[in-house]
Image (spheres, rainbow, N blue to C red):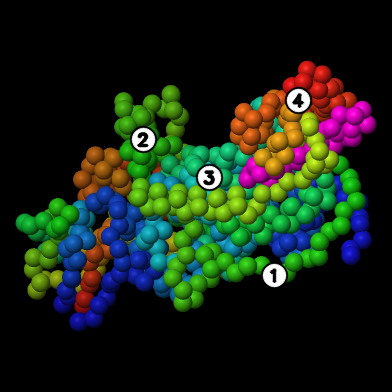
Amino acid sequence: MNKIFSYPEALVDVPMHYCPGCTHGIIHRLVAEVIDEMGVMSKTIGVASVGCSCFNYDYFNFDMVATAHGRAPATATGVKRVHPNCLVFTYQGDGDLAAIGTAEIIHAAVRGEKISVIFVNNGIYGMTGGQMAPTTLPEMKATTSPYGRNTALTGYPIKMTEMLALQDGCVYAERTKISSVASINKTKKAIRKAFELQMAGKGFSVVEILSTCPTNWGIEPVEAIKWMENNLEAYYPVGVIKAPKEVE
Amino acid sequence: MAEKILMKGSEAIAEAAIRNGCRYFFGYPITPQNEIPEYLAKRLPEVGGTFLQAESEVAAIYMVLGAGAAGARVMTSSSSPGISLKQEGISYMAGAEVPCVIVNIMRGGPGLGAIQGAQPDYWQATRGGGHGDYRLLVLAPATVQEAVNLTYEAFDLADKYRNPVMILGDGILAQIMEPVELPEENKEQPEKTWAVCENHNRPRNIVSSSYPQVDVLEQINLRLHKRYNEIKNNEVRWDSYLLDDAEYVIVAYGSAARIAKAAVKMARAEGIKAGLLRPVSVWPFPVKPFQDILPQVKAFLALEMCTGQMIDDVRLAIGNARPVHHYGRLGGVIPLPEEVLGKLKELVKEGK
Amino acid sequence: MGYIKIREERCKGCTLCINACPKKIISLAPYTNSKGYNPATLTNEEACTGCGSCYAFCPDVCIEVYR
């Protein structure tokens, strides 16, 4: 028998610190597999942000820059301007990208910065212990919305990827989810499209991936995926939001 | 020898950066330093460089982090309120050991303050500025020529120590025009084996200030501390005027030192043995010259365009050995040499 | 005809692979690994088709699939 699936080369073979059932690990693997399949590991530079994924510089097997909360798109801009032939991507959670880093992400899209953004949205701050995020759903409980998110007090969940897609500099925006083998494969294809468009010099690309946080949602991993589909996906519909004609 | 040309301080700083290999600039408009980005917006494309106006000072400093991590010579400039915004990123760069040059053209504060030149950011510049136990190498030019020389040198120092270097100027220095001799273009840059870039057959590089293990972070802190001590040993810079027999010593840096020099001349004409000690590196602060001249000195006068910040370093340099006084104008008001002379005469009269 | 190898020390017992397996032939072992997790284990080697669903879902990338 032949080995069909195993550890990708672009991922360092070490245990990851994520909680059991956290989908970050799946997304890390998808990013790594795409890099392996494109044969670009030697010219990939990742930018780690702040949140649960802030230690991913230990996991990705290529050059990495770790930066501050929300600032990954600006940092990636600096990297990409110096090394325009490299594949440069940020890996950001929803607290990082949709709250403190709103200005940086929007303006990276506005500039048509030739970077790709892996945006992992699970509707909550994971690393700091389950606080309300701008993406937290109405009525959803978090440690700083203990009675459920009150929209009269804190407003409504932010739809970042739609907002990014509106910018002329953004060439590709897709929202996917991690809920089935098919949706995982679709996510991988979306990441590949984003990376390929970047390498073709087309502009800014973003893949938002609906994800889970079993620990801070307080739900078992398998149930968390169902909850994500029934709730997060209802608010954040998956699909291609913007793509160049040749990709559609 | 190159011929002298007339240049504005801010433009001279920008040109000096290019002359020492700076090819990336990220910034955000703020007065009174706008001529730096404006000059570079024209000049950098001519030399194959990149000028990018960011959406904020915060974004600009992280673009600097990215470009610096990628191995480029990179600069940003701003003025007091904008430098406050950059502090987070400066701390991250100190922690991640990313070299860069930051220009602070100071103006009056606090808050929005006013756009006229002042010196209220000395503490912020010399005490780290952002969070965490770090230092910046801070150079404070007093003339346009010195601004050229120090900016040029700042890129070498940043690379040598893998640490951000700050040029601490003010609105006067940025706006004044003086003849300068520009250095030759330097095409040689040190190899940066630690930078992120295309990677063939070397272990991967990680540029990060994240050290989640406390014992590891302690070792990093100790390593940085050792480097700061090296900077203290190697990079102290200062200048003086009529200091040899001075009994009353004005201590001033940057534009204030120009005023101090005029006051010293006037005092000498009236028979007062005045002199000027001018720190050029304000971190590391020049301690030794204070100790060397101490026996002859009756009193020190710290002249600063703020309520007194550098005076702390003067006191740290001499302890309680001599009285240390302060004179300054605030909020962008420039002290006149006559006022400084008046203060000196007061000290002489009172035998302080 | 397939086979999977699970690196039990890496497994956190999250059960996502168990849920993903179309043949329902993965379950948690009755013992724990050194981290205290009951690792996933293949219960019926004959029935495995090597489809890779478990691999696709494993957040710790601790499954190798042979076919």
- Residue type indicated by callout 1: Glu
Does residue C11 appear in the picture of this structure? Answer: yes
- Residue for point 65% across, 52% down: B235
Residue farthest top in this picture = B350
Q: What is the distance, in whole Å, between disc 1 and disc 2 at their CAs?
A: 50 Å
Q: Contact (CB < 8 A) between labels 3 and 2?
A: no
The magenta stretch spans residue C45: no
Residue tagged 1: B188
Amino acid at the residue labelled 3: Tyr
Query: Which residue has dot 2 on it?
Result: A131
Mark 3 secondary-structure assignment: loop
Q: From the viewer's perspective, is B132 left or right of B168?
A: left
Which stretch is magenta?
Answer: B260-289
Q: CA distance from mark 1 to mark 4?
A: 44 Å
Residue A163 % position (x, y):
53, 45
Q: Residue B350 appears at what percent x and percent y?
A: 78, 17
The secondary structure type at the circle numbered 1 is loop
Which numbered circle lies on residue B327?
4
Residue B285 magenta-highlighted: yes
